[in-house]
Image: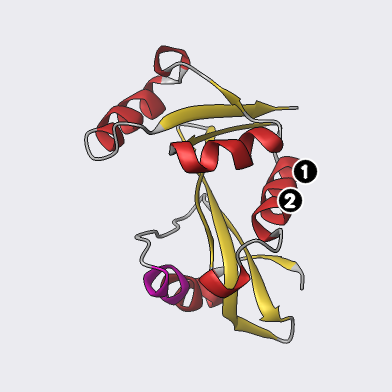
Amino acid sequence: MQIIQADKTNKKAIKRFYKNNHYSASFMGDDACYFITEDSADNTNIIAGVIISYQQSTPFLHALVVTKEYRGKGLSTLLLNHCQQQINLIYCFANNSLCRLYQQQGFASIAANQLPESLKVRLLNYQQKSPSLQSLIWQR
């Protein structure tokens, strides 16, 4: 298994992966999407993925998803480590059940009022549906 950075040719497979895992996500122009496939020769059978979007030049990690059959095998950690090698500063939001995963990777909780304005607005919108959502930050 290897981590692959998505390009336009992978877009359909990525959309299908997120849809099959009941996650609404898409990636656009400046976004970076990294994914892992079951077979390195076949980039269409995605088993894990993550997206880094840029909110007014601020890296925002989201859509960290692993297919059910592959959970607990360290794929989330592999993807997070890869993102941390690419970028010096990363923000993300997580519910209580996922905070520990991020904290084990060096992320720290951050108050909403310490977020860049664009992320603060996004967090407040998300918290209307998920009040326990927390903001986290990682920096080198």
Q: Quadrant of residue 34?
A: bottom right
- Residue 20 is inside the magenta segment: yes
Does 37 appear above or below 61?
below
SS at mark 2 in the image: helix
Q: Position of residue 83 (x, y in %)?
A: 68, 46
The answer, for residue 60, to whether it is visible in the render is: no
Q: Position of residue 70 (x, y in %)?
A: 62, 70
Query: Image point 76% across, 73% down: which residue?
Result: 1
Q: Which residues are magenta?
A: 16-21
**Residues at circles 1 and 2 in contact by the CB criterion of under 8 Å:** yes
Query: Image point 47% across, 13% down: which residue?
Result: 114
Query: Image point 36% across, 66% down: which residue?
Result: 22
Q: Amino acid under label 1?
A: Gln
Q: Amino acid under label 2?
A: His
Alpha-carbon neighbours of circle 1 within 10 Å: few (<14), some, or many (≥20)? Answer: few
The one nearer the camera, 66 or 3, is 66
Residue named by callout 1: 85
Q: Position of residue 18 (x, y in %)?
A: 43, 67
Alpha-carbon neighbours of circle 2 within 10 Å: few (<14), some, or many (≥20)? Answer: few
Residue named by callout 2: 82
